[in-house]
Image (cartoon, grey):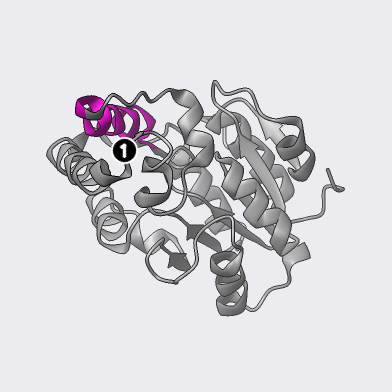
Amino acid sequence: MTGARCARVVVFDLDGTLLDSLPLVLAAIRYAIEPFGGRATMDIFGHLGGPPERFMRTLIADARHVPEAISRMERYHHENFQQIQPYAGVRPLLAALGRAGVPVAVWTGRDRSSTDRILEVHRMADLFSTVVCGDDLTSHKPDPAGLREILRRLEVNPEDVCFVGDADVDVLGGFNCGVDTLLIRHARVIDSAIAACAWATVATPADAYRLVLERADALPVDSI
């Protein structure tokens, strides 16, 4: 863990970081793999962040069923889309960063179409300086290309940035980019090698939001 340098820019992952979508994601994956004998637990969240083809192969014994499983997952997700909500404290957090003049960005493995839809539904699209999605580039987390693209767009150096995510691939992506990364572990047990690559590890999004405000030297928000 590096020293607490002041963050000029804050980058967030989306699902499990700003959006309370984990129950829906897990339910969709369970529905997807149920006919094929697969099993999904909370541990799967540590490996999300890239294309579904990648993690689905680890859940289904016969790779021939992966396309059908992905189709089932996408259908379930689409039919239950309204369950996704921002975590409590997200809006006060973004407002405080805005008042402090700290640009905020998103680096997500979620596809562009559903990302734009979620941000529009919750009136969050205008709150971010830039957004990089999972299908914007040919590479995926933990490859740091998406994070580097955000740094290029905002014209900042890695040491000026704090990245917040909830998956192992977030930590590795930030570490490989030289960016201090704050990991939200939720109920997971984090591998010691992953934890060693994180700037800090916290249990909940609310804990992360408080640390972000400190790193960005933003005003405290009582509701977080």
Residue sitting at x 76%, y 31%: 192
Q: Main secondary structure of the magenta part?
A: helix
Residue 188 visible within the image: yes
Q: Is residue 196 left or right of residue 168?
A: right
Above or below, comparing residue 16 to residue 14 in the picture: above
Q: Is residue 78 left or right of residue 132?
A: left
Where is residue 109 drawn, in percent x and y? 43, 54
Which one is nearer the viewer's eye here, 180 or 76? 76
Residue sitting at x 33%, y 34%: 25
Where is residue 152 drawn, in percent x and y? 60, 78
Above or below, comparing residue 69 to residue 172 in the picture: above
Name the image quarter holding the C terminus: top right
Queried whether the magenta region covers residue 27, the answer comes back as: yes
Name the image quarter holding the N terminus: top right
**Residue for badge 1:** 62
Residue stretch in magenta: 20-35
Q: Amino acid at mark 1?
A: Asp
Where is residue 143 drawn, in percent x and y? 59, 62
Which one is nearer the viewer's eye here, 71 or 146? 71
Residue found at the far right of this picture: 3
